Image: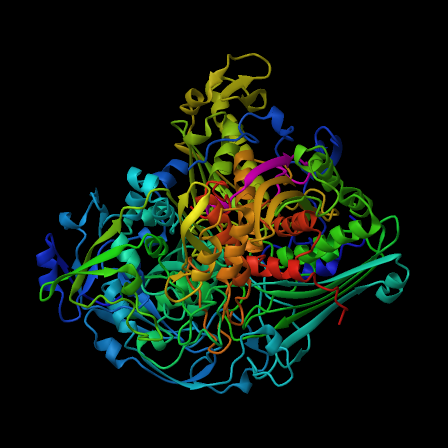
Amino acid sequence: MAPHMSENFLRDLVLEEALPQDEEKKPDTTPKKTVQMPVGVPGYTLQDEAREVPESEPPVWPTNKDLKFVGQSVERWDGAAKVSGRAKYTADVQLPGMLYAKFVNASVPHARVVSVDTSDAERYPGVKGVHVIQHVFGGAVLRDPSLEQVKYPVVRFAGQPIAAVAATTPYAAEEAAALVKVKYETLPFVVEMDRAREENAPLVFPGAADQAGTAGGGGGPRNVSQTGNVHGPSIKKQGDIAQALKEADVVVEGHYITQVQTHSALETHGVVADWKPEMLTVWASTQGTASVREELAAFFNIPASQVRVITEFMGGGFGAKFGAGNHGVVAAALSKKTGAPVRLMLDREEEHLSVGNRPSSDQLLRIGAKKDGEITGIHLVSYGSAGCGTGAGCAGPATNLYKYAALHTEENDVFINAGPGAAMRAPGHPPGAFALEQTIDELAVKLNMDPIDLRDKTDPHPVRRVERQVVRESDLWKSRNPKAGADTGPVKRGVGLSQSVWYRFVSMNSSAEVRVHRDGSLEVLSAVQDIGSGIKTVLAQILAEQFGVPPAQVAVKIGDTNYPVGPNSGGSVTTLSLTPAVRDAAWQASQKFLADIAHAYGASADDLVLVDGEVRSKSGKIKPVSFRRAAAKMTTDQITVQAKRIPDYDKSKYLTYGGVDVAEVEVDTELGRVQVKRVLSVHDCGRPMNPSLVISQINGGVIQAISYALYENRLLDPNYGLMVNPNLETYKIAGSREVPEIDVRLVEAYLGQSSTDASGIGEAAGVISVGAAVGNAVYNALGVRIRRLPMTPAVVLAALRRPQPEMELA
Amino acid sequence: MNAFVLADCTTVDGALSQLKDGAVVKAGGVDLLDRMKNGTAQPEKLVNIRNIPALRGIEETDKGLKIGALATLTEISEHPAIRKQYQILSDACGSAATPHIRNMATVGGNLLQPVQCWYYRSADFQCLRKGKDLCFAFNGLNQYHAIMDYRTCPAVAPSSAAVALFGLDANVELVSSKRGQRVVSIKDFYVHPDANPTKFAVIEPDELLTAVVIPKPAAGTRSAYQKYGEKDSFDWAIADAGVVLEMDGNICRKAIVTMGAASPVVRRSAQAERELTGKPITEATARAAGKAAMEGATPLSMNAYKVDLFPVAIYRTVRLAAGQMDRDPRAAG
């Protein structure tokens, strides 16, 4: 699409599993047909476009208004099971003879482990096994491992797991874990990023270290220089930034600081592992059954065929639940050692400390523009800390939202002695957008332009243009006073907007099986897990649309690696990757079904169609018969079809999605309190397969973003390197009273890319942009810009007392 | 959590007979179980008093009000007589924590909770108030700590109910099997850390808090309490104010102004009260009271903002008590 959108960026985002829409090496000989597909936004830009697609592809679906089940707000397939408590999560799994495991975690932020004495723990009544960890997952690893000659992994953060105990009760496990004696040789540590950047700072690693990403992104660039604790810079340049800024009529710049946020999913990480000689079965709270299987098979050097991973229900992941993790490996090792199933669920403190977080950022951003709003150059220098990991880069929004003549970004990771970062809902984008979208807002002020007009000038994305139009016509936006700080009285109202961008990633590792039974019942099976977005419901809708039966009657069986492989749920890939495979399987099953029963009706298969739950004859030779009755004529008990994802129809397109979010705030200037009153979220995600599920994801994203902007903050004591708020009491998360009125408007934006033409929403869903929208709304209320998160009373009052001077770029 | 013995009692005498050898009283269990789970409390025996009927109930007497130790924060905040005559107490109990916690938390347990300082609440920090030498907050993270009246420990008074009871001149009834009953004024109930860092209140290990007694308010008394956090749902106060005004027509005959989140023990601000006593309640006098309350404030490295917040909390609560302002939508509860 737009030439400025960096291919490099796309590569660097490291959705390792999601990326390859493998370019076929050999010539594509699949028979093709040309179809007309709806492309664009109904009511704005919708038109038919031609696509060449494999002949086996099902007929093109019309837009949502002409479908019966798909595109409708069908009730959540497993909603009743979830709210009634019938749904069994990992922690609910009870196996005969199951043991309970508990980690022994490091009590210091940086140390060599001299010895681990497990003898007292092993003697404790009820204890069946103790495991001492030899390899720690998560975090960066030294490029040259020989720099550390150690028996046990070096402790790089307080809370790093060192060992684990399995016992017959959770209480015995906890008591015994406390009896494991770890002898440390403590090392100097640093937990403040500014301090870690200093020349004489204690070193987190004795040499250069890198962190791999996961299926959900995260991780940082490799092959960059490292100086002390500073891993980077990773530099990207397009055009001549110095020249571009010189040619600008106006240059705005700001220094933005964002905090560390932890994932804080309601359900903690955990597994139940059952090691049997012929099969390792693991119930896991994971957003990637495939990734757990892959890691366990590799770690224990057993074939993938001997590992089964089950995730029937899960309570949230937000990017931190890929792979087996330390808990998965340790539970499996303990199960192998003891011969009994082992449950290992983390507690809330461990969640905060050791299984991932959204890295901090410290950004210097400078944007130059012409008088008419045309951006000449964007210059971003960022530092951020993912603890003892990498992945704090945040240049995505600056790189991919607007047109510019020149771009220069330098991203640096700074190691500190804290738990490693992990992919978290739109990695890098919430902090990046917080700086970028406030700077664009500031540019509009300097140019005396309307913020929407400015974006119309500089943002080439056709769908966001429609979304801005929706915003422009909304009552909320119309109620905005363009003059900042205009309200009199201590409580001031403001309205601000921000945009977001995310990318179309497709996981080709997506397949499913559809079964038609002789009694007319239907099944769909895939190893995909439901991270909470409702993929089960969507799969049922697809079969319902094909066979004309109500979605609630479709049996959906997912979250088990015994089924055809499914995508890991990260980077907004699940729905757009898997649903075309399911539709293709359903379509092919319907064709196989018609061929199978045609003989019984004396018809030819070509003459039969399956429409609205009826088998009909095109020629009118036979009377319509219900699908259920026709199924009784099947020649076998079951018709089975498997299908896998085929590449997007038009791979030449580089596609992004996004949205525009508007926040209305009230700022009590005496208390420094910011309250978000209303949010208008206008978003696109291709064909919304189930609007109420999409809206539900956006509601969650908006709340998570408000929580990030105003409340959440991982606090580490600088003198001892320990987290002081590892709970959900003083680690503050938005509660029911912090939730504003949220108005979500979905913009259908057809892309013509697959048999369902679905897209993703998880990342763009308000998470990226609402923080910046709140920032811009606060500016609109006060005439003072808050450049630091979270915007607590202390931060707001400080800004009101002393508006920050604009800072020079380093 | 360590293993422990649970002694379930149904009478006060039964409970008192169990209170020995390190036994700890458990009422609603809200705060105690948190501390046991994070390892900062490891009692060998819990004496469960939750099933003692004699400790329940809220009773109006000729002299005032008697609140059983097991009355929950919800019961207190919703009690019609308390809402009418002791608004400050209804406000304070109704703004604590969350509805779920208020349904479980008892007034006795609320008054006896130790400080909420995150160093005190962590098993990793052995601080002054656990009998060691060091306070970690002075050079550490102290954004929620005290701005006044601290020398040894700047953790703030955690109980909102106590802020109200200081304003109402309440008494606390304590009983032990050896020494019988004694009545202690709420003003004398808490122990300042400078005097004894490990003893939070005068109650002895063998004593049970059985009731809170509040005298009848003088004619013309109006009161209110407001608490401000960083958020509304489930947060501790970063500033709060309890105000009791004895009004004689337009003139304030007597004023009591109390704060919880400013200091280690609930503070009555004589300076604030002086600005109101004998004067009409106006925008100006209410502002002056708020300002005066911060005289002598010495914020720590990270909490200077609190010095800005208390005058606002006091100003708005004085006006609320006087009926000149609505309840602040930005206050919790």
- Residue in the picture at 87% in, 61% down: A244
Colour scheme of the picture: rainbow
Q: Residue furthest right?
A: A247
- Residue in the picture at 37% in, 39% down: A83
Residue A272 position in % (x across, y down) = 34, 58
Residue B127 position in % (x across, y down) = 36, 76
Q: Which quarter of the image is occupied by the C terminus of chain A? A: bottom right
Residue B170 position in % (x across, y down) = 28, 54
Look at the image and give the residue range highlighted in magenta: A735-759
Looking at the image, is A518 positioned above or below residue B91? Answer: above
* Dominant secondary-structure state across the stretch colored magenta: loop
Looking at the image, is A170 positioned above or below residue B277? Answer: below
Tell whether position A758 is magenta: yes
Residue A643 visible in the picture: no
- Residue in the picture at 21% in, 74% down: A124
Count of number-bearing discs: 0
Residue A730 visible in the picture: yes
Question: Of A306 and A156, which appears nearest the observer?
Answer: A156
Left or right: residue A712 compared with residue B16: right
Residue A528 position in % (x across, y down) = 48, 48
Question: Of A61 and B128, which appears nearest the observer?
Answer: B128
Tell whether position A40 is magenta: no
- Residue in the picture at 47% in, 53% down: B276
Left or right: residue A154 compared with residue B74: right
